[in-house]
Amino acid sequence: MPELPEVETIRRGLAPMLARQRFLAVMAGDKRLRQQSSLEEFSKWVAGRRLKSLRRRGKYLVFNLEGGATLLIHLGMTGRLMLLPSPAPALPHVHLTFQMEGGLDLVFQDTRRFGQALVFPPGETPPPLAQVGREPFSKKVTPQWLAEQARGRSRPLKNFLLDGRALAGIGNIYACEILFAAGIHPGAPVSRLTLKEWARVLKETRRVLKAAIRKGGTTINDFLNSQGETGLFQLDLLVYGRGNEPCTRCGTPIARLVQAGRSTFFCPVCQK
Ligand SMILES: [Zn+2]
């Protein structure tokens, strides 16, 4: 499941390839994503428009189009964006194909259809973006601000990181890695964290995400050539998926627990 670093990697791969290009046409597959604008809306607001900029907010790719409309893409659990020479070959589970003027097709494939492809008319802030929290690298995010967001809440720290409405873009894998690096128990109630602990969480959040983006960057060419694979699985994960393996710091077997329906991996000795 793509998280902030994977989406950022995809953005960095696509942006130079699509810069200032016009969307010539939009084609839709038989089955729709769970959240997908109609072909009429795509034809009205996307077809014929140039891409002004490609940004990222949380796990969303934000295509700002000439004329002021916004195309939002979220890869959900299994979504892939591919840039293929036009006309792209017929592939299974393709929901949308954007024909670009440079001779490439931008293809959105999603086997489980949890992805989103939504277009919003000019002047409208896309409602899904209003739900996205602050970017972890924003200067507006400080240990004090995090403590304020957590005030009076008893929810576990890992759930707070996953929520996305305070801090954007962190998913299950990186949340586990961040908390291991920070040495804090994933079940720690957020209201009890000290400023010092928030500072550690923030520092490790930025370090882990940055390292993952750097890894992803080395695979950008592969990504463009090999149909949307990102660097996610090249990342050296220290706890995620390592249940019962010895902790790299202290040798204690890595423990697993389920929080909000998701597996959490942590070291019961290093994370207090
Ligand atoms: Zn340990």
Image (spheres, helix red, strand yellow):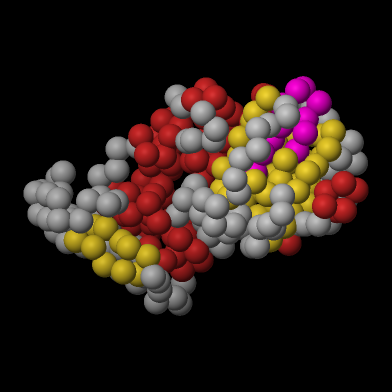
Q: State whether residue 209 appears in this view.
A: yes
- Which residues lie in the magenta part? 98-109
Q: Is residue 258 above or below residue 60?
A: below
Q: Nearer the viewer, residue 96 or 272?
A: 96
Q: State whether residue 125 appears in this view.
A: no
Residue farthest to the left, as pictured = 251
Residue 67 horizontal side relative to residue 159, left or right: right
Q: Which residue shows up at 32% across the image and 63% down it?
A: 263
In percent of width and height, residue 59 lies at: 57, 49
Q: Is residue 269 above or below residue 46?
A: below
Q: State the image quarter where residue 138 is shown.
A: top right
Q: State the image quarter where residue 49 is shown.
A: top right
In percent of width and height, residue 22 lies at: 83, 30
Q: Which residue shows up at 39% across the image and 49% down it?
A: 174
Say which quadrant the C terminus sits in. bottom left
Q: Nearer the viewer, residue 250 or 234?
A: 234
Q: Please tell me whether the stretch drawn in magenta is mainly helix, strand or loop.
A: strand
Tell me, yes or no, whether the highlighted magenta stretch contains residue 108. yes
Q: Nearer the viewer, residue 53 or 31?
A: 31
In percent of width and height, residue 141 lies at: 52, 51
In percent of width and height, residue 269 lies at: 14, 58
Tell me, yes or no, whether the highlighted magenta stretch contains residue 262. no
Q: Which residue shows up at 26% across the image and 58% down it?
A: 265
